[in-house]
């Protein structure tokens, strides 16, 4: 499965939230299905989001590229360090987390 294509499809057809603070707020409320963070997000922030996601039973996925790449992939003119998939729409992006947990 092409991870990048599915992330883009989720952005286009589903409901997503961008940014560390917005993701943190929603995850603490238990809103969302998949949390995606860029590879260059600071370690402390990444661990904090991962911990909150585990508490809220939200899947966690680390995107292997930088925040600039994630921003470009989502069609945004800025970097995106973290994004939360609330509704995947027509994408199969939730399968990414399931397959990465098995590894």
Image (spheres, rainbow, N blue to C red):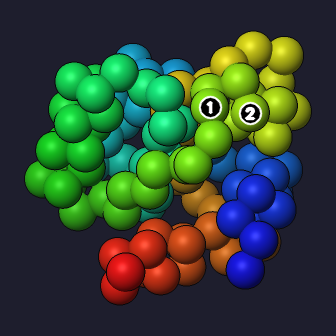
What secondary structure is marked by label 1?
loop
Residue 40 horizontal/vertical position (percent): 49, 28
What residue sits 73% from the left and 80% below the top? Answer: 1
What residue sits 82% from the left and 62% below the top? Answer: 5
Quote the CA–CA distance across marks 2 and 1. Answer: 5 Å
What secondary structure is marked by label 2?
helix
Q: Quadrant of residue 66?
A: top right
The vertical placement of 96 against 25, above or below, is below
Task: Compare residues 4 and 25 and report the one nearer the observer.
Answer: 4
**Which residue position is annotated with label 2?**
69
The vertical placement of 91 against 56, above or below, is below
* Number of the label disc, if any, that sits on residue 66: 1
Are circles 2 and 1 on residues that touch, CB within 8 Å? yes
Left or right relative to 82: residue 79? right
| Label 1, residues with CA under 10 Å away: few <14, some 14-19, many ≥20 | some
Residue 91 horizontal/vertical position (percent): 74, 70
């Amino acid at each position: 499965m092409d991870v990048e294509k599915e992330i883009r499809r989720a952005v286009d057809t589903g409901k997503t939230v961008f940014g560390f603070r917005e993701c943190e707020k929603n995850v603490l409320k238990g809103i969302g299905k998949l949390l995606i963070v860029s590879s260059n997000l600071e370690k402390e922030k990444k661990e904090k989001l991962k911990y909150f996601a585990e508490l809220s039973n939200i899947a966690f996925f680390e995107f292997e590229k930088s925040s600039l790449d994630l921003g470009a992939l989502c069609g945004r003119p800025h970097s995106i360090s973290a994004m939360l998939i609330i509704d995947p729409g027509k994408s199969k992006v939730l399968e990414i987390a399931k397959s990465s947990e098995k590894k």
